Amino acid sequence: MRKIAVAMAKGGVGKTTTAVNLAHGLASQGKRVLLVDCDTQGQVAKFLGEKPPYGLYEFITERRADGQHIARNNTIHPSRRNLWILDGGIRLVELKNWLGEQSREIRQTVLAQKLVPKEGMLDFLIFDCAPGWDVLSVNILMAAKEVLCPVALQGPSLQGLKTFFRYLQSAQKLNLDLRLEYILPTMFDRRTRQSHKILEQLKKYFSRQVCDPIHYNVRLSEAPSFGQTIFEYEDRAQGASDYKCLIEKGCLKIFYFLFGTADY
């Protein structure tokens, strides 16, 4: 099972857009995907037009808001064929407080310990990470094996990338299997010099990890308002083509290279 954290220190770079469309695109290819929303904004469910009654807080603590026990399986919400979600939202504030009360070992590794599906149940586990660095961020990077880092090709994006590298290096001291596999340029506008300049810098310093860019696309920004992924909203849009490229040249290509075409 592949465990991918979609993470970046800076907000507004397309993390949730990438996590949602990557997850649905993989699910559409027949891969079984669990998408975990680790942000207090709880955007994943909104992007998919869902209202899950439970989520990550209940999954980790195994208790509902009223204090009653709930089985972890009952907190996972089916969203699309082959796609399930663990909702985030404001209750993650309570989860962070709960984590802060635990011993150091539990505080840092509880997500990795509890997110262990039975063999063959999932092909991909994708985390939509919040910007910044806190106890939940540490948990995610302890549970993940790969990092996909979206970088907006506008504004002070490279500064955000530099900050995230410091976070990542700290996590790699605790999780020796964690690797930065993808740097995904987002919001590429071929009309602006800035987009081209930042893309050139990324390719210069991170040539192996840099993916083909996600172009700035109106349809891509409209789709969440309708509770749809770009593949559902406008499959012929540039954004849909870009995410298909990411899946086919990036995630699925490596998947087939590592595992062949075995039926999971």
Image: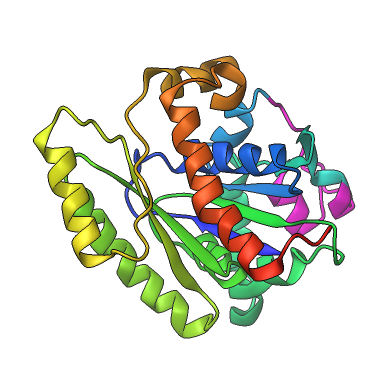
Q: Position of residue 69 (x, y in %)?
A: 89, 52
Q: Nearer the viewer, residue 136 or 251?
A: 251
Range drawn in magenta: 50-73
The residue at 82%/42% (across/down) is: 66
Q: Is residue 229 visible?
A: no
> Which image quarter: residue 107?
bottom right
Answer left or right for 25 relative to 117: left
| On screen, residue 175 above or below 130 | below
Q: Is residue 256 magenta?
A: no
Image quadrant occupied by the C terminus:
bottom right
The residue at 16%/42% (across/down) is: 196
Q: Nearer the viewer, residue 160 or 27?
A: 27
Q: Nearer the viewer, residue 135 or 256?
A: 256
| On screen, residue 33 above or below 144 | above
| On screen, residue 76 above or below 80 | below
**Which scheme is used to colour this image of the protein?**
rainbow
Q: Is residue 57 magenta?
A: yes
Answer left or right for 97 relative to 9: right
Answer left or right for 86 relative to 249: right
Q: Position of residue 166 (x, y in %)?
A: 31, 71
The residue at 12%/46% (across/down) is: 197
The residue at 59%/48% (across/down) is: 92
| On screen, residue 97 above or below 151 | below
